[in-house]
Image (cartoon, rainbow, N blue to C red):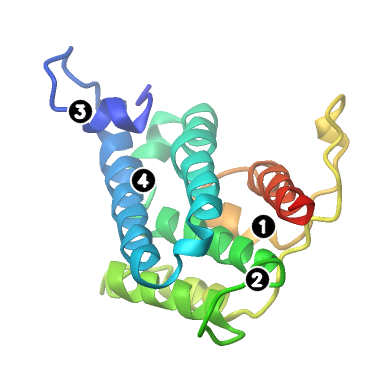
Amino acid sequence: MFGLIKKLLSRKKQKPLTERDLNGRNHVGYPTMQLSGEIDKLIKPQFKAIKPIIKIYKDTLFFKWGPSVINDKLSDDQLAKLSGRNLQMVYLLLFRDMLRHIAGLVELKDQPANWPDLFAQKVLDNCQMLNDADDTDIAKKQALFASAQRYSIDTPIDDKHPENTEIPDWTVPLAELIMLPSDMIYKCHQPLLTAIKQRKKRR
């Protein structure tokens, strides 16, 4: 068990980390912290108006639901093989989709219509996400990032029987990058984004 990211990155004295803990820290914790940090750097100068929205989405997906699902679904062997770059890409694609969905609900001064894509591109570049020469998934990730598709979240999740929820096809390539079942991608993204959109519409 690699537990919570904060525990893994803590410098306080504690019991020695297990191999699973170390893999969680190296393949999940550190890549997530880098991605989160680069997003935070971009918020300050240009996107203060949506800082609360970004914080809700990022804190929930990156630091709660995402690590919990990975810990629950990946075996020790899978976690050891998990690519931190792939995890960053999946998080960034979902984050960009959230920005695309809320773009029509927020007002940002002096920003072009495609500001969600420009934001994501800057994060991608700053993390050097596609720069590893030995990355065998670069072509797949380039294609996913180049897509202008806004992910469909219209299918509600059946809370009583979640296994009956029809999962959209867009989740499949993202799930494959990080070895998760595709329904887990949808069940993290859909309710969180739906709640954010409803909150913005009420204001």
Residue 103: assigned label:
2
Amino acid of disc 2: Ala
Residue that badge 1 annotates? 172
Q: Nearer the viewer, mark 4 or mark 3?
A: 3
51 and 184: which is toward the camera:
51
Q: Is residue 84 visible?
A: yes
Q: Provide residue 34's location: percent of width, then percent of height.
A: 29, 54
Relative side of 53 to 200, left or right: left
Residue that badge 4 annotates? 81
Amino acid of disc 4: Lys
20 and 156: which is toward the camera:
156
> Going from the N terminus, do you reach mark 2 or mark 1 first?
2
Q: Disc 4 versus disc 2: distance between alpha carbons?
A: 36 Å
Q: Where 76 sits versus 173, above or below?
A: above
Residue that badge 3 annotates? 10
Amino acid of disc 1: Val
